[in-house]
Each structure stands twice: as C-alpha cells, then as structure tokens.
Image (cartoon, helix red, strand yellow):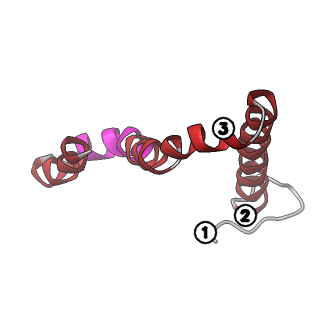
C-alpha cells in the first residue's frame, strides 16, 4: 500500500503531456487500491455469516447497482442524453 501511495509523489516530476496520458490509469489504480484495502478484507467475514452463494450474489448485486448508477449519472450529467444538453460536473 505504501508503494502505491508513493506513485502520487512521482507525478510531480512528470511533464504535463505525460501526466495527461497517465492520469486515468493512475486514478484507476488509486480506486482499485482503496477497494482492495477496504473491501476485500471484509469479504471472508461476510461469507462466514451467510452461505457463499448468497454472499457472492450480494457482492455481484452491489457492484452491478453501483455500476448502473454511475453509468446513469454519467449519461445524464455529461450531456449524452439529447434531451439534456447540460454539460458539467455534479
């Protein structure tokens, strides 16, 4: 986890063009490391408290719900809907 955190300090040394190219993968790495550090250690406890099939169904349902919500917000808020011409952030 510390090595992943150090990647952020390296970005101060990069040129703007290189940073623009690496920005999205670095954000994805940060999100994945947060997920791995916070969510995955809780999975064994959840599997112990219910059947593995039920736990897996809840995990898939949760990820799917957040994916659909994110896609819907991106679709509505960034002007991809022809009825909604607003472009901007939340």
Residue positioned 78% across, 65% down in the render: 85
Q: CA distance from mark 3 to mark 1?
A: 40 Å
Callouts 2 and 3 close, C-beta under 8 Å: no
Dot 2 crowding, Cα within 10 Å, few <14, some 14–19, many 20+: some
Q: Which residue is mark 1?
A: 89
Dot 3 crowding, Cα within 10 Å, few <14, some 14–19, many 20+: few
Instruction: Report x, y in % for residue 84.
Output: 83, 64
Magenta residues span: 17-28
| Rendering quarter of residue 90 | bottom right
25 part of magenta stretch: yes
Q: CA distance from mark 1 to mark 2?
A: 7 Å
Compare marks 3 and 1 and give the one earlier in the sequence: 3
What label does residue 77 carry, if any? 2
Residue positioned 42% across, 43% down in the render: 24
Q: Foreground: 52 or 66? A: 52
Instruction: Report x, y in % for residue 23.
Output: 35, 46
Judging from the image, what secondary structure is the residue with disc 1 in? loop
Callouts 1 and 2 close, C-beta under 8 Å: yes
Compare marks 1 and 2 and give the one earlier in the sequence: 2
Q: CA distance from mark 2 to mark 3?
A: 40 Å
What label does residue 48 carry, if any? 3
Residue lying farthest to the top in this orientation: 53
Judging from the image, what secondary structure is the residue with disc 3 in? helix
Compare marks 2 and 3 and give the one earlier in the sequence: 3
């Amino acid at each position: 986890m510390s090595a992943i955190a150090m990647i952020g300090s390296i970005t101060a040394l990069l040129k703007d063009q290189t940073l623009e190219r690496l920005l999205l993968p670095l954000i994805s790495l940060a999100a994945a490391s947060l997920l791995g550090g916070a969510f995955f250690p809780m999975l064994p406890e959840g599997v112990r408290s219910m059947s593995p099939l039920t736990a897996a169904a809840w995990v898939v349902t949760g990820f799917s719900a957040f994916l659909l919500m994110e896609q819907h917000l991106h679709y509505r808020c960034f002007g991809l809907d022809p009825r909604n011409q607003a472009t901007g952030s939340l």
